[in-house]
Structures are given as C-alpha cells and as structure tokens.
Image (tube, rainbow, N blue to C red):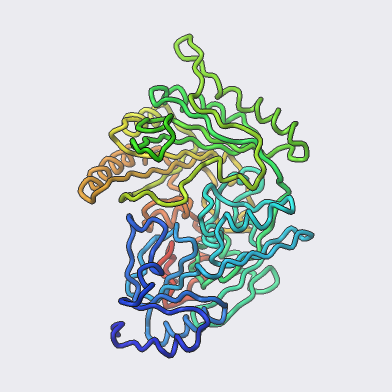
Amino acid sequence: MSIEQIDVQPLREQLQGSVFVPGDDGYERASRVWDSDAFEQVPAVVVMPETVADVCHAVRFARQHRLPIGVQGGGHGHPAPANGALLINFARMTEVKVNSEAAIASVSAGALAKDVVEAVTPYGLAPLGGFASTVGVVGYMLGGGVGWLTRRYGPGAASIRAAEVVTADGHLLHVDENNHAELLWGLRGGGGNFGIVTSLEIALYPVRTVFGGQLAYPIELSREVLNAYLQWVKTTPTTLTSALRIMHFPDRPTLPPLLRGRSAIVVMACYSGSEADPETQREQGERLMQPLRALTVEGEIRTPFIDTLASLPFAQIASIAQDPVKAPPVLSASDACAFEDMTPDVVEALLRVAARPESQMMVELRHFGDALAAYPEQIMPFGMRRATLYMGFMVSAPSSSLLEEKKRNLEMLMQDLRPHTTGEAILNLAGTITPEKINGAYAPKDYQRLVALKKQYDPENVFRFNYNIQPAS
C-alpha cells in the first residue's frame, strides 16, 4: 500500500502528538537526523509522540497498514534509513526523573546526554554516558554504551535496571529482573531489536568531579605520541579512561586560531578516582598524565601546543571530547575495528594513511583495557572480550565524488588492518553496519539467545532499521 492510499487522519485523532506525511509542513524537520547532510531518509509517515499511549497507537497503525517501523531518539545512530516506514521521532519525550536516594534515573526515549547530566549532577551523581552531549541516551544504552566511566563502572547498557517497552503488536511491557528478565538481558546491548523502548531506568554513580581534558601535539609527532600512548595505557588504573585522535582541521574562522588549518594528534583523558577530595584527585591526575605531557624526541623535550587538563565538575564532562553540537555540513563515511594490541606494523599502516593531512581522515582510538572483558556475560550480551583497544575512522568531503575517493582510501587501510584485528565490534561505534559486524558484537552463544528473543518479540522483523538481528527461521 502506497502512502497516497493511507488515511492518517484516524491516527491524528488518536494522538496527543503530531503526524506528518510527505508534503506536510514540518515533515522534513521531523525526518531529519543529526548529520542530515550525510544521511537522508524518506519515511512514509512520521509520528512525534508525546505519550506512551501515542507510541502504542502508532505501532498498531503501522501494523494495520503493513508499514515497518523506525525509531529515532537523538538522531546520531541511524544504521539504516527508515524509507517507506512509519518513523517514531521521540524529540518531544525528553523527561528525566531522578531518585537520588536510590541513585536511579528514569530517562525518556528522546532525552539527550546533556539532559540527563543536567538532571543528575546536582545530586552528586553521574550516568554512564558517552563522549557527546547531544547523543540520545536510550539508543546509546541499548547499543552497549561506552564512555568516560566505562573502565571503572562498565558499559552503559549494564546500568539499565528496567525499561518500558512497546512490543510489535502495540502492547506496553514493564521489563525488569522480575518481569521478562530475558528481555532485559537482551535490551542491554541488543540495539532496539525487540520493541520500542519508551523509557529506561538507569543506575547512577557517585562522581562529582573528574580530572580531564586534552593534550594536542603537531601531526609531525604522530608516531612518537601514538607509541608513547600505547605504552602508557598499559600502566593506567581503571579509574582513568582515555582516547587518542588524529585530526585534520579545516581553515575556518569558527575554529580556534591554534587549530585552524592544522593537523594534530590529540590525547583525551578522564580520571575519576579520589572524587571525594578534588585536590587529591587533581594531584593524582596530574601524576598519571605526566608521561604524555612531555615527550623526549631525538634528545629534545617536546610539549603539547594545547593542554586543557584540569579539574572539572561532572556537569562539564562533554568539554573533554569537545564533540560538535551540530554536525559539520559535509558528507561522511565511517568504519571501525578492534585490537588486542597494536603492533609496529599496525602503527605504520595507520600513520602511512591517516597522518597525511590530505587524507581528511579522522581516527579515534579508545582504550578499554580488560574492563569490558571482565564484565559478567550473564548480565548483558557484549562481544568485546578480547580487544583492549577500539579504533574508529571517519572520512568526509564536500561532494559525493570526492567522498568516494576518500572511502576507497579508507577501505584500503581497513584491508591492511583487518588481519591484525579481533573481529569484534561495538555497535554504536561500528561505522557502516554489516552482518559481520553485528555478529562480531556478540559472543556466538549470546547471538543465538538474541535471535531467539527476536523470534519471540518481533518475528516479522518490524523493527529492522537498527543494528538488525534477523529472527530465527
């Protein structure tokens, strides 16, 4: 049935929220994702619910008209465009409720990381959020969720305590350890395959302050900085999470003069230990970061041209990564891989391509150590059991023809790196999604449990515009 044959007026009359179809004022805005220059979708219907009942009505309408269903929270994660689907955009459901005594937050499906941080930090608490402030928290958690507190407290998905889920037949379930416990396990990393999560209850942690920031060196020192970083992370405690970026900045007046038109290799770090005493935390953080604040290169001491390391209230956690609030107006493509360790051959293969300014390739290397491998498998499905390092890549260009050239360079680099990788993946950071990456995100026995859950809760694969797990045949 084409959208011209679907009468959405009955749905409009049922909802407190809004319904848009192509041609309506507001349709394009309601369909838009965070990086809309790089990703477009053309849903048949867009619903912007204001209540859980709206979501239930929308699902039943979609099933009645044989429409698949897409879900959008913050708009950062979009593995597949919801073309021809009924898209549920949660931008109006952003409520965050905090139970400070229980250290629990109830987070609606449209709430962004900044909304949750703003709500919980007055109580001296912190969520297991990511690097960026504009990421949708529910989608981030369902996809695993790795961020600045991962090495200390685990992935964000493990902090899920309960969920409200609208199933493929439009019914609402309360999910916790005592109700639909197997589904709760699947939600902690299953990527939204089993229903529409309208809210999550997540655990919060006692972190008021951190010591963190960035150290930026010129790209000419990329080999020395990367090698020093790879040795340094083997000595850091679980209270310190770090990442390294290779970045090529355009010559734009909106950028700080020190970065404009420049390439750099940047270390980012967040130390959350000794949070009861900020001064002790700062002293310990300074000591831990010292090996990367001064490098000896050919007998000369080299220091970063940018050093933002400082004590921060957790409310300012997003300032560490300084991810953009708005997506740059370019086309882009991405990929990722995982390593147990990076050998000299891997370092050389990476720098041979990515350190060249003309590559316009951004690389982000995250260190997790053994924190993910040590996390109990019975709590959640998670495939990062061997890797200690996770590397993401993004190439960008102003036109599709130039982007194709950049993508070819990225694929050649990936071909060189793949023999050295573990084959594991983190769905929220996987780049272009393939069946191999979805398999790599889970242990084989966990994947089979997820397939069984998919068959039980969504046998027709109505929820398919995600990190899709096919129902068992």
Q: Residue at x 69, y 58 (%)?
A: 203
Residue 454 in picture, x, y percent from top left? 49, 71
Corner quadrant of residue 200: bottom right
Corner quadrant of residue 362: top left
- Of residues 363 and 422, which is closer to you in this image? 363
Residue 402 in picture, x, y percent from top left? 22, 45
Task: Identify the residue at the far top of this view.
Answer: 299
Residue 237 in picture, x, y percent from top left? 65, 34
Residue 68 visible in this rendered orientation of the protein: no
Task: Identify the residue at the far left of this view.
Answer: 401
Q: Residue at x 66, y 48 (%)?
A: 153
Question: In what quadrant of the picture does the C terminus appear?
Answer: bottom left
Task: Identify the residue at the far front of this view.
Answer: 253
Question: In what quadrant of the picture does the N terminus appear?
Answer: bottom left
Residue 459 in picture, x, y percent from top left? 45, 77
Q: From the viewer's perspective, is 155 left or right of 328? A: right
Residue 459, placed above or below residue 292: below
Residue 315 visible in this rendered orientation of the protein: yes
